[in-house]
Amino acid sequence: MYLTAMRRADAGDYGALGELIARAMEDNLNRFIVPNVAGPVRMVPLAALADDEFTVQALRQAAQRGRLSAVQGADGVWRSSKKSVEAYRASKHKRSPKKSGA
C-alpha cells in the first residue's frame, strides 16, 4: 500500500500518499496523545482506549452488549472513558455466581 502510494505520488498523484499519512497521524493521535491528555472520565474514541488486552473491536462489542459504558455518537464513532474501560476490565475477570436450582 505504501509503495503503491509512493509510486502514484512519483507520477504526480498525491492523493493516496496524503490519505495514508493522514490516517497514520489520526491513528497515532487516538492511540498515544488523546488518552494521555484526556482525564480518566473524559469520553474519547474507543481507538484511544484499545490496548494489548482489548482491541477496538472487542471494546465495541462490549459496548454494544452493554458490558462497557460507552456511547455511539451521531458520527457513528463509539466513545468511552479510561475509567469505564478499567471497570469493564475488573468485571471481565470476575465470574458471576451460578444460580442454584431450587
Image: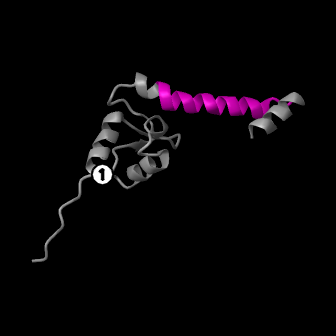
- Quadrant into which the C terminus falls: bottom left
Q: Is residue 35 magenta?
A: no
Residue 43 locus on image (x, y percent): 39, 33
Mark 1, residues whose alpha carbon is within 10 Å: few (<14), some, or many (≥20)? few
Magenta span of residues: 13-33
In depth, the one of 65 and 56 nearer the eye is: 56
Q: Which residue is mark 1?
A: 92
Majority secondary structure in the magenta region: helix
Quadrant hosting residue 15: top right
Residue drawn at the location 32% of the way across and 31% of the way down: 41
Residue 82 locus on image (x, y percent): 35, 34
Given the current orientation, which residue lies at the most extreme bottom position? 102
Given the current orientation, which residue lies at the most extreme left position? 102
Quadrant hosting residue 98: bottom left
Q: Please, what is the three-letter code of the amino acid marked with disc 1?
A: Lys
Q: Is residue 17 magenta?
A: yes
**Going by the image, does 52 lie left or right of 88?**
right
Residue 24 locus on image (x, y percent): 62, 31
- The vertical placement of 61 against 81, above or below, is below
Q: Name the element at disc 1.
A: helix
Q: How did the renderer colour the structure?
A: one colour
In depth, the one of 100 and 66 nearer the eye is: 100
- The vertical placement of 14 against 84, above or below, is above
**Going by the image, does 12 lie left or right of 99?**
right
- Quadrant into which the N terminus falls: top right
